[in-house]
Image: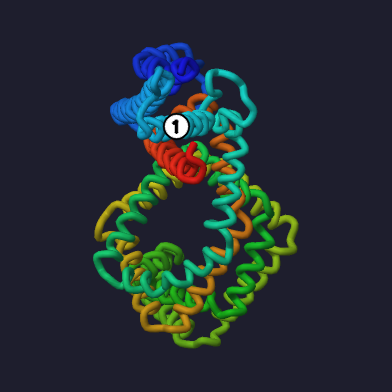
Amino acid sequence: MGKHRAVEPEATGEDTHTQVENAPTATATDASTAPANRDDFSKVPGPSPQVEAQRRRTLRNHKAFVTALLIVAAVIFLGCSWWQSQEGGAPTWVGYVRAASEAGMIGGLADWFAVTALFRHPLGIPIPHTALIREKKDSVGEALSDFVGENFLNAALITDKVSQANIPEKLGGWLSQPTNAEKVAREAGRLTANAIRALDPKDAEMLIQTQLIDKLAQPEWGPPLGKLLEGLIEDGKVEPVVNELIDWGHKKVLTMEDSVVTLIDERMPTWAPRFARSLVGERVYKELVSWVTDVKNDENHEARQAIRRGLRNFAADLQTDPELIERVESLKSDIMGSTPVQGAAEAIWAKVSEAIIDQAETTDSMLREKIVELCLRWGTNIQEDPELRESLDNRIQGAARFLAENYASEVTNIISETIERWDADEASDKIELMVGKDLQYIRLNGTIVGAIAGLVIYTVNHLLFGV
């Protein structure tokens, strides 16, 4: 009895009550003294202070009730023992009650030890294999990590679940709904706009400068331009440009009669008669119009061929003529060193980012409409095309299998690493708050089952041997 009274305050009363009373103070002290760079992962996640306080009260009440039952068993045992020790003895039934209370007290004490040993050393004595959660926290974390990996994140199980989920079919049905397609477009636009805003403009401008503008200035411009022009000529891409230039020249000449006549009049000798100057001017103009018209209408006109030869020669010179290449490089240096080009990265990013954000956030923008259209088309195609559904399903299963086989350990390591960072005492306390109430029923059952077992054993012994 004396031993029991020494044990129970730790399990039920003073220690837990002190923890509850001092919890706010301890928390405040810890918060004020903890270093600013304390690893947040070392804190054990838990409920709100109100919920935690309620759980502590509930746990304390359950401990008090089970302890009271144990004390009642001890009192009954002592009372029966005293009665039997008196002169004249005690009635027979007292032996039955004494046996039941004795066994119940022993069962309750044994289960108290077992429950207490999970969270702390009983009586503060470092008995081996006690304070299991505190001492074996890291081992429990590793075991839990292995358990989750083997039973929840194994490739076969995940692939089977993914296959049963019929993800492509459900995805196709979901995407084919206009409201869902609009939701995808809206969320994609929101994420895009937020991503653009999150980028540091200086980094974006540096990327444009180094990957676009600087690289544009690195090679010689002459040979690539010559090669490009040569390819355009061979593909006939330059001919429409030549036609446009000739058409423009023809239209221009048709409006220049007065200018041509006046020019000829000014260039002829002053002694020539005025009518002669006019006749010459008109004649020259008519010949000019006739010539330009012939150039326009005749695809093989000598002037056209001369233009083509000139372009071919120019393309070749751009690739081989050192003097022309040097002149192009000089022009390139002037262009790349100009103020507009030097500030081009900032201007490009400003315009591009503004355009992307505007397209992403405007409901009826071309970008949002294209996303909606794409979602609807994809949803319909997935629903109507069995081969596409099968292909998507195989890809999804393959991706799930790959992730499970290669990264399941990374996920489960989070469990063991997080538990390893937890403070052992705090983790033990939080776990006791979570399951301690249910564990008190083990103590209760130990007392009750012990009493019943003791009664049965005493009864059988009494019937068999009369003792």
Q: Residue furthest front?
A: 88
Residue 86 placement (x, y as % from top left):
40, 18
Report which quarter residue 444 is drawn in. Answer: top left
Residue 46 visible in this rendered orientation of the protein: no
Q: Residue at x 41, y 83 (%)?
A: 385
Q: Residues within 10 Å of mark 1 (few under 14, many from 20)?
A: many
Give the total number of marks visible in the rendering.
1
Task: State how the image is colored.
Answer: rainbow
The N terminus sits in image quarter: top left
Nearer to the camera, 356 or 20: 20
For the residue marked with disc 1, what is the amino acid?
Gly
**Viewer-proximal residue among 221 and 14:** 14
**Occupied quadrant, residue 79:** top left
Q: Position of residue 307 (x, y in %)?
A: 57, 75
Q: Is residue 305 above or below residue 11?
A: below
Q: Where is 111 relative to 211, above or below? A: above
Q: Please say whether residue 113 is visible from this viewpoint.
A: yes
Identify the residue at horizontal 37%, vertical 14% (top origin).
22
* Residue that label 1 marks: 108
Q: Residue 104's x, y, as percent?
A: 43, 33
Q: Is residue 305 above or below residue 465?
A: below
| Local SS, label 1 | helix
Query: Height in image: 193 above or below 104?
Result: below
Q: Nearer the viewer, residue 293 or 159?
A: 159
> In this orientation, which residue lies closer to the viewer: 92 or 438?
92
Q: Measuring 41% from the left and 50% from the top, which residue is drawn there?
A: 352
